[in-house]
Amino acid sequence: MADRTKVLGEALSPSQLGTLLVAGYATQALCYFPRPQVTYAGRAALLTEVAAGLAAALGLWLWIRVAALHPGESPEAALRALGPAQWPLVIGIAAYHILLGMNWLMIYTSVLHGIFLEATPLWALAGAILAESLYLAWNQVVPLARALQSLWVPVAVFTVFSLAGGMALIRHPRLLWPALPPTARGFALGSLHGLSAYLGLDAVAWFYPYVHPAARRTAGRHLFWWLAGSFAAFSWALEDVMGTFGPDFIPALRWPMAQFVRLQSLATFYVNKFGLVVLLLWTVTSVSFEAVHITVAAQALHPLGGYRTRAGFRWHAAVVALLIGGVLVGVRSPYRVQHLLGTTTLLTGAVYTFSLPLLLLGANALAGRWTAAGPRAGEGS
């Protein structure tokens, strides 16, 4: 397959690749964060965030290695080394990104319905979000990256000002210094839940081929700086929430980040309707998140559908969006569905993020050795 940038005549910049990467995982730190980490690790929650950040860096490094196996091609090329075993994995990759989309859609629509728009049914909220996400993903990767780059600038600026302003709410400065984990099990579970904010970073392998060949090495290095920025924001938010509510009260909050934002002074930001600003920007991040995973799932299904035109991609993207929206069909207890989806997503993502790249790297290494040994074996016969 030809290099994506030669086929399309356009390419991603390193900053656009970084924006796509962050948009594909950082949104998951809203709402529940950092309740699970504090619940399991108490005042050692910051240490679990450090462990999760290091694990995410390892996962990112592995997926960049997968992307570099066949420069200019998607992981579809790396999957071919598995022979017939690639087909269940193709379906599994698409299903994983659909699961990520389902999980966040269920969480965010519940927050919207429970706090801001109680009279609006969940299906209407989900339909609006998915329609906007599909619109962003409609023209494939490069236009999506350009749109997200412009949308995420105000999100990044707001995040910094919000976290800085939130420091005024800290009532227990001594809690900012982490304690030792109460138990090894609590630390492990807290770290595992901390990793949930980074799930989806494997999307880098699907977007990496769209970067200009001369800029790929630079883009790969820059991705770790983007990850470090996300880690710094998550840690800062955790410290703000910990110092404001304390480790005993946080587990009792359904959505700690939402409660924290509601406490912030409106005068700090010179706006009269701070809640509307939060609602707008969180919706932007949610739409971006869904658009990224719709795009990845549609690309992952390429070996099955074999589309060669933009129209073919759009059909796949539309089907993926419908599958994600299907999570709300017949839902009577959204919080029970959230718990089921959250647990499934966390466990699946933790295994997927590390095991699949190791499998692909190992299979391609063996295939390369077999190919290299083939001519010599033929010469000796």
Image: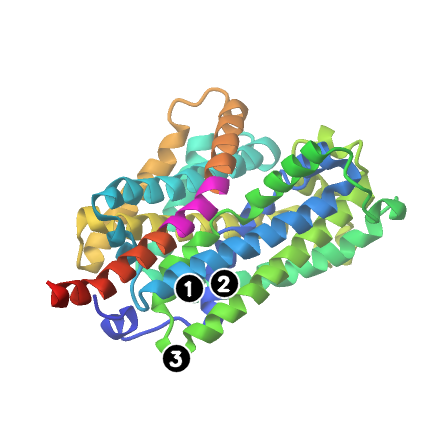
**Dot placed on the residue nearer the N-terminal end, 2 or 1:** 2
Of the residues shown, which amino acid type is indicated by label 3?
Answer: Ala
Residue 161 position by quadrant: bottom right
Label annotation for residue 228: none
As for residue 361 lying within the magenta part, the answer is no
Of the residues shown, which amino acid type is indicated by label 2?
Answer: Thr
> How busy is the neighbourhood of tag 3: few (under 14 within 10 Å), some, or many (20 plus)?
few
Residue 317 picture location, percent across and down: 29, 48
Q: Residue at x 77, y 56 (%)?
A: 165
Asked if residue 306 lies left or right of residue 17, the reply is left
Question: Depth-wise, is mark 3 or mark 2 nearer the camera?
Answer: 3
Regarding residue 107, the answer to whether it shows in the image is yes
Residue 311 picture location, percent across and down: 20, 55
| Main secondary structure type of the part rendered in magenta | helix
Q: For the residues marked 3 and 2, what is the alpha-carbon distance in whole angstroms?
A: 19 Å
Label annotation for residue 214: 3
Of the residues shown, which amino acid type is indicated by label 1?
Answer: Ala
**Residue furthest to the bottom:** 214
Asked if residue 129 lies left or right of residue 247, the reply is left
Q: What residue sits right under mark 2 in the picture?
A: 19
Q: What residue sits right under mark 1 in the picture?
A: 145
**Dot placed on the residue nearer the N-terminal end, 3 or 2:** 2
> How busy is the neighbourhood of tag 2: few (under 14 within 10 Å), some, or many (20 plus)?
many
Asked if residue 202 lies left or right of residue 74, the reply is right
As for residue 357 lying within the magenta part, the answer is yes
Label 1 element class: helix
Residue 295 picture location, percent across and down: 35, 53
The residues colored magenta run: 350-359
